[in-house]
Each structure stands twice: as structure tokens, then as C-alpha cells.
Amino acid sequence: MNSAPEAHITHRHEEIMANIQRRRIRGKVWQVLFYLATTIAVLALVVLILNIFNSVFGYVLIQNEVEPETLVASGNLADMQNTELIALLEENLSTGLIRRFNSEELLEERTTKDLALLVQQRIINPTIIESWSMVESIFDQDAIRATQAEYSGAVLQFRSWLTADFLRSPQNPRPQFAGIRTAFLGSLWMILIVMAVSFPIGVASAIYLEEYARADKWYNRIIEVNIYNLAGVPSIIFGLLGLAIFVRLLGGLTQGRTIISAGMTLALLILPIIIINSREAIKAVPASLRESSYGIGATKWQTIWHHVLPASFDRILTGTILAISRAVGETAPLVVVGASTFITVDPDSIFSKFTTLPIQIYQWSARPQEQFRNVAGAAIIVLLVLMLSMNAAAIITRNRIAKNRRV
Amino acid sequence: MSDSRGDTPRQVDFSRKTRTHEQVIQWFLFLCAALSILVTIGIVYELLKESWLFFGDPEVSLWEFVSGTEWQPVIGQLGIWPLLSATLMTSSIAILVAFPLGMMVAVYLSEYASPQVRGTLKPILEVLAGIPTVVYGYFAVTFMTPLLQSIFGNDIVDVYNTASAGIVMGILILPLISSMTEDALSAVPRSLREASFALGSTKMETSMQIVLPAAFSGIAAAFIVALSRAVGETMIVALAAGAGPNFTLNPFEGAETLTGYIVRISGGDISYNSIDYNSIFALGLVLFLITLTLNIISRRIVEKYREVYE
């Protein structure tokens, strides 16, 4: 009599258990998907970094026009005296070329290192026939040897494209001599200008919006909405603004496509970010601090200057440095403002023509020759190290100030 | 805003008249803040002025600009669609890659990961977000394009193609989506999750059917902000997507985007008041309007659909 409902209950029970099982499995499947997605994201970063190193280190096949052994017995240019090097240059190069070098800087006055570099570039004149990535250099050695056999006299060399010479030399149309000196200096100039312009204006705006502005006034609301909208404008639009205002309209003051025009453009670009970050920092200062300052009779500005700013300065500084490190990596607005495509002279004032690290990376990556990819990879490492050290500086400063803070 | 300190007494007001330097400082601070308005006015004015000159040119017709499918300024063909379609292609591919991945990363970080794991993964994603876009462009050219070519074959995948640019752009905006979504998810109060668990839901059901819908406004905002970022992204497409306008829907063909065109034209020596110079401002205006609209929509969504708890 009871068997029917009992069977029904067991059946129900099984159904429920099966259902729970199904739901658990579905949960597991999704969890695996979540893990997978996160792994992909982390993997992307790893591959991105490895890919850079992959092209910076690897075999190159070099052929010299003149073997160094025929110039000096030891084959090492560093063993030679200045006079010997000059004699070598005068012997092997046309008088026109020697005259040009002399007009840049007298050969007699140059350092041994410079002269050796000239001999290296102009007489020995190594040409890179082919270059291989790190992965190819490790796993594809047979093919590399086969290519080497096709060229007589060519030397196979394991080369790091990131060398001290790469940091020291200016630009060069040939990848094996190309360097980032001018670009690196350009980036440093850019940092200085951006910092000098956007930091005071950004912090001042943040103080106004946090401490003075009354929310019920229409103009304050406009300023606030406007800053958020500006933060979302693509950087290339700021490039167009810089081109129209700083390069063209104010061309008399800025002398056109110069460091100052580019620096101002970048300063305007990161201004909204600095304002937003600084406001967050000021907002975090407890109201009790302000009230106790008012309580002992301080004016509004005295309160801000002596209490609010010191208490929030570490956060303001961190936010600013992070914003500036973003400016260091910007490329598009600088291309639009008019970065120089090829300069070999160091920038020496804010009215110099300029190029920066990202611009160099862009130009080298856009070229079809394989070797410029290697050079671009080396420049990327320099750029990333520069940005990393800025971020590290931000963290260290923050910690140091935070330790000394009274609150 | 100041209403957050509504309890701050404004007792300094009575002494204002006698303290001129305080007044001067306040004016100076106000001017600094107002500078941002000036920047906006500058952008809008210059874009409109040059666009006005562009459309005032007898060779240019507004109708052809919004409907034409050829962009060849040299022979007077000025239809925006080849550039616009390439921008839409790269942005859609980027969103297709980044949105599902970013959402899943966010759910994992907010619902599944232990605090230690979250503490390691979040900085890694921030590093990904902080890498300059030109480095991503380099990555697209030296890694993604050869990868696609080895998968699909050299004759199908061009050296410059929108697929490679789009996928790499997806990696670029992934941290943006995941961090905005994660913020939205962690803003959902714990009580909602506990109520769901108490009713017998599994962790996955709670995450997908309770927490995600509750954070809808934040997720929608993340989607739109990421889209706006993708539309305005320049260096990846300039390096990887191709250097010639091409009206195509094939992701393996090269096609120049709005931003790619602006960068290529202004990278050369460009003379003022030429049709090239004016055209980049007209295209800049289109780009500005698209991103501005997207940003305004995202703010509206956050304001309108935000679920307020307790």
C-alpha cells in the first residue's frame, strides 16, 4: 500500500540529487572557465614581455667591409692611439668626408672612443646580413649555420641589441649603429615640462574643487563634469589641439614643432588625471583636521596650506607621478604635434626639435627591415625601465612621507 | 564635493573682506580649475573651425562625406566609411576579445579568489594597463600578425590586418573592463550573496544570477568606457591595421582607421590650410563626437540604473 508513495519519494530524491549534481558540475565548469580567463590575461603579459626579450637577444650574421686585423695587428681598436686612428681615417676616407668631420668637431680634439667609433662605422663598416630572434637562435641553429655558409667571411655573433653604445649613440639610419640618446633626452625634457606645468595647475584645481567650490553653483558643476569628460577624450584629439594651438596659433612663442609645444600638449592631456587623483587625496583628509585648525583661529588658506596639503601630499605626489609616467608612454599626440623623424643633435633647450622614446619605437617598428624590430625591442626595454623606475620612485616617496606624517 | 563636508562650519566667511590675499588665492585657484573649460573650448573651437573650412571647400560635399565609401583625398574622393568601418572592425574585435574575458576575470577576482591571490593578480593587471600603447603595437606587429599568419596561412592573412590589431587592442582594454567590473561586483553588499546561499544556490549561481545583475550599471559602464577607449586607440592600429583606407569587412585584410589616418597624415610634413590638414580635423571631430557620446551614455547609465542598497 505504501510502496507507491515511497517509490515516488525515492524517485523525487534521486531527481533532486541528480539536479544538485548537475548544478555542481555546471558550477565547476564555469569555475574552470574563470581560471582559464585569468590565466589568459596573465599569459598575455608574460608573452608580451618575452616577445620583447626574444627580439633583443639573438644571433646576427655580420660581414665586415675591412677586417679589423688588417688595420691593427691585435684586431682591437681600443689598443690604438689617437694619432694612429686619425691616420687610419685620413688614409681610408675621402677628403670631403674628413673635412665634414672636422667641421663638426676637430678630429684631433675628439676622444679615443669617438675616433674608434668612427673607424668602426666608416672603415670596418660591418653590415648585418641577417638577424635571428632568441627562440630561433636556440632552436634553429642548423638553419642559421646553413645561412652562414652562404656568405664567405661572415661572422656569426650572439648579440644583445641593448648595449651601452645603444644608450649613448644618437640616431642612425643603419640599425647596427642606431641609438636612443636623443630620444631618451627628449623624454627627460618632456617629463620636466609636463611636471612643471601640470602639477601646480592640477593641484590648484583640485584644491579649488574640494575646498572652495560650492556644489550649488552652476559653474562649479560645469567644471566638474567637464574634467570627467576631458579625461575620456582620446589622446590623439589632444594632439590635434596642440597642433592647432601651440604649433600654429602660438608658433611665434613656441617656435613651432618644439619640445615646449609637445610638453604643453602632454601637460593638458594628463591634467584631468592629476586633478581627479589629487581630489581623491584631498578628500581622504579627515574633516576633524580642518575643524581643529579653524578652531584655533586659522583662516581657510592657512588651514589648507598648513594642514590639508601636508596631510595629503604623499597621495597627491603618487597620483601625479603615475599620471606623468602615462605621459612618458604617449605616442599619438606627439606624432600629431610633429615629432622629428630624424635628429642626431641632442635637444638643448625647450625650443629644440624633439623626438622621444615612444616615437622612436613607433618609427622603428613601422619599418620593414627585420633589424629595426630588434632595435625597437631594445628601446622598449629602456622605456619600460624608465616608467618602472618612476613608479618605484612614487612608491618610495609615498612610504617615506607617510612615515613622517603626523596624522 | 563640498556637501560631503556639509557639517563644516563656514565661520570664516565673516572675515573675508579684510583678507584680500585669501581672496586673491581663491581667485587664482578658481582660474586654474577653469583652465580645463578653456581646454574643452579650445578643442571644440579648433575642431569646428577646421571642419568648417574643410566642408566649405567646393570639392567637399557633406553628403559624400557621410555616405561615400571611397577615401582618396588626392583624387577628391572623400567618403568617411572606409575609415569608420575599419574603426568599427578593430573596436568590435577588441570588445569581443576583452569583454567576456574581462568579465570572467572580474568574477574570479571578486567572487572566487582568496585575498592573497587577488593581491598578486590585481597588480599584474595594473601593469598590463600601464604598458604604453606603442608597445602593444609592436606586440601586434611582431607577435600577433605572424601568429595569425601561421594559423590561417600567409595568403589569407595580410601583413597588416584588422584582426591582429583588434585582438591586441582587446588585451589592452581587458584590464580596464576587469577592474571596473570588479569594482562594481565588490560594491554589491554581502547580504545579497548570503541570502542567495541560504536559499541553496551554488557559488556559480549566486555569482551569475544575483551578483552580476545587481552590478549591471557598473558593468554596462565598463563596456561603454572600454568601447570608447578602443575607438580612440591609435598606436596599435597605426602599426598593425594597415596604412591605406580600405572598405572591407574581412578582418584579415588591412584597413586604415580614423586614428590611423590622422597619425599617418600628420606624421608627414603637412602644410596648413591644405585639404589634408583640414581633413584630419574633420575626422577628429567625428572621433570626438563618438567618444563624447559614449562617455556621456556611460555616466548616464551609472546615474540612472545604479542599485542603491541600504
Image (cartoon, coloured by chain):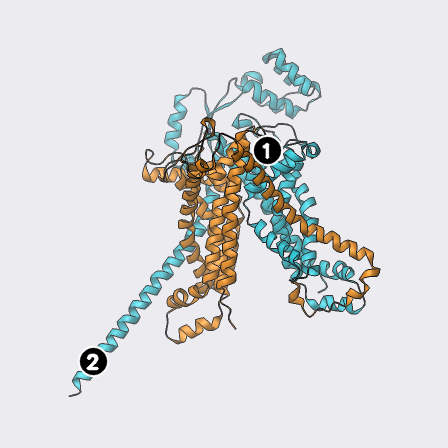
* Residue type indicated by callout 1: Gly
The residue lying furthest to the right in this view is B18
Q: Position of residue A95 (x, y in %)?
A: 63, 11
Q: In the image, is residue A291 above or below residue B36?
A: below
Q: Residue at point 62% right, 43% down? A: B42
Q: Nearer the viewer, mark 2 or mark 1?
A: 1
Q: In the image, is residue B240 above or below residue A154?
A: below
Q: In the image, is residue A77 above or below residue B255?
A: above
Tag 1 residue = A338
Instruction: Indicate which disc residue B284 carries.
Output: none
Q: Earlier in the sequence, mark 2 or mark 1?
A: 2
Is residue B175 in view from this perspective? no
Label count reads 2
Local crowd size for mark 2, using a 10 Å CA cut-off: few (<14), some (14–19), many (≥20): few
Secondary-structure class at tag 2: helix
Q: Position of residue B78 (x, y in %)?
A: 45, 33
Q: Is residue A249 left or right of residue B210?
A: right
Query: Chain letter of disc 1?
Result: A
Is residue A125 in view from this perspective? yes
Q: CA distance from mark 2 to mark 1?
A: 81 Å
Instruction: Indicate which disc residue A8 carries.
Output: 2
* Shade of chain B as shown in the rendered figure: orange
Between A107 and B159, the residue placed more toward the observer is B159
Between B57 and A280, the residue placed more toward the observer is B57
Q: Is residue B252 left or right of residue A259?
A: left
* Shade of chain A as shown in the rendered figure: cyan
